[in-house]
Image: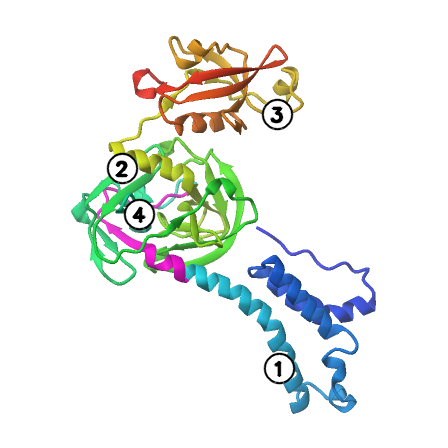
Amino acid sequence: MVRLVGWDRGWSRAMVALRSTLLAPVWLALIWLVPAVLVAAGLGSARAAAQPGAAQADLPPMIERAGPTSPERRAALMHQLGEHLKVLEAQSAVLKAVAKLVGPAVVHIEADVSASAGLQFRQGPEIEEAGSGVVIQRRGRYYVLTNRHVVRGAAPGEIKIHLADGRVIHPVQVWSDPETDIAVMAVSASGLVAAELGDSRRVEIGDFVLAVGSPFGLSHSVTFGIISAKGRRDLRLDGNQIRFQDFLQTDAAINPGNSGGPLVDLRGEVIGINTAIASNSGGNEGIGFAIPINMFMIVAEQLIEHGKVYRAFLGVSLNSRFDAESAVAAGLPGLMGTQVTAVTRDSPAEKAGLRPGDVILQFGEVVVEDDSHLVNLVSLTAVGTRVPLMVLRGGKTLRIEVEVADRSRFRVE
């Protein structure tokens, strides 16, 4: 939770007086969406209003001395307010445009699921019986992206997809992956509107986002916030059945019913699929989680093409206790990478020459953060891909190339 810190008490009286005209509109702008150019314009107009010789100083002395109830003074305040509102209205227009752009592609989903569909980062009451989704287009066909827990156990005929225009359709086919909580539904109807997909690799902490969905069944609700964290991989969800995690964290309000709905950036592009909340009450407490859209689509494309997910296999066991002290002892400046403790016989790792004790620092072009990060990177790599690894061995770095194999061919504990 973000708490506002009080102003510096050491400010001079002049700065305190200036604050009423200068900082009030700027602080409101910071609470809302604050594009840099608009903020600069807003600050400029606010400063102009506070400076001698500006609009306020042009008032006749008798009006300036009049109380706030005088018609002249109120007219002047209305004019000043109108100038400041131009900044906030321009910023609000961005949110309105994004909501209008994405709204027609968002759907409300009702399914006769085998179990209640609420996902929370705790053991608690399961209260969600419906969810959300977003329509996309791939190779001339339309699909709805959502979470597996929203439609789990339901046949296509038992799933109602409520479109933004009021029509209700059923999916033609449903695919899902329990290890990521991803589901894709093929749909067919006239006049479908598809959302644009963004690039979740570009997402940074602090980016403004909107969450669109059906919290508590209130369809097409829009909430606003920021990306508050990235790379959340150790959430205990659905009895830990959701093995591959790399969640975006947001403070945009997400509640039961938002699951499967899009998390959207200011370009109107989907950068995540809302999936879970951290809550003690069952409702929003400022921490929600979304599957990055790049990760989602890697799984979704395989489900559409093959009907199942083929996951890659490297063939190493990793040291979950590899910490900063261990990293320094291995010759690293700080905690990074993950350490190999064992290599599976006849695996891609053994064929490539990986050894116990090696520290894998980089997988392809991605710097490895920890063991769970490497597991995700491998699992989301296409089977048969040759990937260069940067490895630390005996205090020296070396490059090893490995061709990842199909995990189903190996016995994995």
Q: In the rendering, at what x and y percent does residue 76 appear?
A: 66, 84
Name the mark nearer the viewer: 2 or 3.
2
Type of the residue with mark 4: Gln
Q: Earlier in the sequence, mark 2 or mark 1?
A: 1
Colour mapping: rainbow
> What is the secondary structure assignment of the residue under circle 2?
helix
Q: Earlier in the sequence, mark 3 or mark 1?
A: 1
Q: Residue at x 25, y 44 (%)?
A: 185
Type of the residue with mark 3: Leu
Name the mark nearer the viewer: 2 or 4.
4
Q: Residue at x 59, y 25 (%)?
A: 336
Name the mark nearer the viewer: 1 or 4.
4
Q: In the rendering, at what x and y percent does residue 125 appear?
A: 36, 46
Disc 3/disc 1 C-alpha distance (Å):
57 Å
Disc 4/disc 3 C-alpha distance (Å):
42 Å
Residue receiving disc 2: 304
Q: In the rendering, at what x and y percent does residue 95 appear?
A: 48, 61
Residue receiving disc 4: 137
Left or right of residue 148: residue 199:
right
Up the image or down, 377 lies above or below 319; here it is below
Type of the residue with mark 2: Ile
Given residues 161 and 127, the one toward you in this image is 161
**Label 3: how many Cα within 10 Å (few below 14, some 14–19, many 20+):** some
> What is the secondary structure assignment of the residue under circle 3?
loop
Q: Which residues are magenta?
A: 100-120
Figure disc tally: 4
Residue receiving disc 1: 78
Left or right of residue 77: residue 158:
left
Q: Magenta stretch containing residue 49, yes or no?
A: no
Q: Earlier in the sequence, mark 1 or mark 4?
A: 1
Q: Which mark is residue 335?
A: 3
**Label 4: how many Cα within 10 Å (few below 14, some 14–19, many 20+):** some
